[in-house]
């Protein structure tokens, strides 16, 4: 009993230990917040030199090149953000057009948007490839992605530009997105009742569920993801609401295509099934293409001819009626 440390010593040691633990958790959470939300301008240094006139694809890209392109800029629906884009006109002034949105840590130079743009263009479509906020050459605000919520307003800035500058009717404009861009175009559908059709590839219905699933792969407790979103909320950053799944309540019978790989390790297959369920609950009849043995945004590379056939048929049915 006489060798036992004094009470104040034990209390002090406990306080120090708790402080170290809380400090460590704080550093870990802050690092996780950055890891999950920070993005990079200029395509994260990738795809250097790629343009609509010259880009790599899973197959010979020659038939898909688009040498007649223009650099354009226009405001997002958030007026303080300028969106950089490439405009590739169609064969006629009234050709239907598709806005293409890239994934996180990428930009309009990515093959995952240039390749499908080339598919559409060679079938008579005009295409508009955009850089989402904080990425590519568009305005950098806080350097973080907005989960598809803010990016949806960038997509709609492109939609507005086509309506205003090119005089296209809403019925002739479709949206295409991969990964983060997929979340953005689905969310845009909820914001804008005039959107005619959406093709989403490897997107999610709920980003909170998706991040929880990602962290579980590394044995990180789900509540760290929840803390990350609470940090974002306190900073006034929109990430989680409205979710793409919630946005589908406003589908109102509009055409929607959902593409996902069973082996996607960035967004689980369950997220695609949730999007399908939300669309059907809203009275929609989505076209769903689930590919076994395919990973994240892998469909266009694993089955390019079928991807082209399905996508062109989808937009033909929606925009050429």
Image: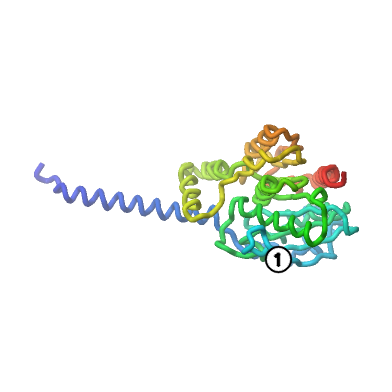
Q: Residue at x 59, y 45 (%)?
A: 242
Residue 48, how many percent across, how many down?
70, 66
Q: Nearer the viewer, residue 192 or 275?
A: 192
Q: Where, quadrant-wise, is the N terminus in this rendering?
A: top left
- On screen, 227 above or below 273? below
Percent from the top left, x then y, of residue 52? 79, 62
Quadrant that contains the C terminus:
top right
Q: Is residue 61 visible?
A: no
Residue at 36% from the left image edge and 54% from the top image edge: 23
- As helix, strand or loop, the secondary structure at mark 1 comes to loop
- Left or right: residue 237 compared with residue 317: left
Image colouring: rainbow
Residue at numbered disc 1: 48
Please state if 249 lies on the left or on the right of 20 as rendered. right
Can the viewer see residue 140? Answer: yes
Counting from the top left corner in percent of width and height, residue 80 is at 62, 64
Identify the residue shown where x is 73% and y is 67%: 49
Position of 196 relative to 286 (above/below): below
Task: Name the side, left or right, on which 70 lies relative to 84.
Answer: right
Q: Is residue 1 above or below residue 87?
A: above
In this view, 90 is above or below 268: below
């Amino acid at each position: 009993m006489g060798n036992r440390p004094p009470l104040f010593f034990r209390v002090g040691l406990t306080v120090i230990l708790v402080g170290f633990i809380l400090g460590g958790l704080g550093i870990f959470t802050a690092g996780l917040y950055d890891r999950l939300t920070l993005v990079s301008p200029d395509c994260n240094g990738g795809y250097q030199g790629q343009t609509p006139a010259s880009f790599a694809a899973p197959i010979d890209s020659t038939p898909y090149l688009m040498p007649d392109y223009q650099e354009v800029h226009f405001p997002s629906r958030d007026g303080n953000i300028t969106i950089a884009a490439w405009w590739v006109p169609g064969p006629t002034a009234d050709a239907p057009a598709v806005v293409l949105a890239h994934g996180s840590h990428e930009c309009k130079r990515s093959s995952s948007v240039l390749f499908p743009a080339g598919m559409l263009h060679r079938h008579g479509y005009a295409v508009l490839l955009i850089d989402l906020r904080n990425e590519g050459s568009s305005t950098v605000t806080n350097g973080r992605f907005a989960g598809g919520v803010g990016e949806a307003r960038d997509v709609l800035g492109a939609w507005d530009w086509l309506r205003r500058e090119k005089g296209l009717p809403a019925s002739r404009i479709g949206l295409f997105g991969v990964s983060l861009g997929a979340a953005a175009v689905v969310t845009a559908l909820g914001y804008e009742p005039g959107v005619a059709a959406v093709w989403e590839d490897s997107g999610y219905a709920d980003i909170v569920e998706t991040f929880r699933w990602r962290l579980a792969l590394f044995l990180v407790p789900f509540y760290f993801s929840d803390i990350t979103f609470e940090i974002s909320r306190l900073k006034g950053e929109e990430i989680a609401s409205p979710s793409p799944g919630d946005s589908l309540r406003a589908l109102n019978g509009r055409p929607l295509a959902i593409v996902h790989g069973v082996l996607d390790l960035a967004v689980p297959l369950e997220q695609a099934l949730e999007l399908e369920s939300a669309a059907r609950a809203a009275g929609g009849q989505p076209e769903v293409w689930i590919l076994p043995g395919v990973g994240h945004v892998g469909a266009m590379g694993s089955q390019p001819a079928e991807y082209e056939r399905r996508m062109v048929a989808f937009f033909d049915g929606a925009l050429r009626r």
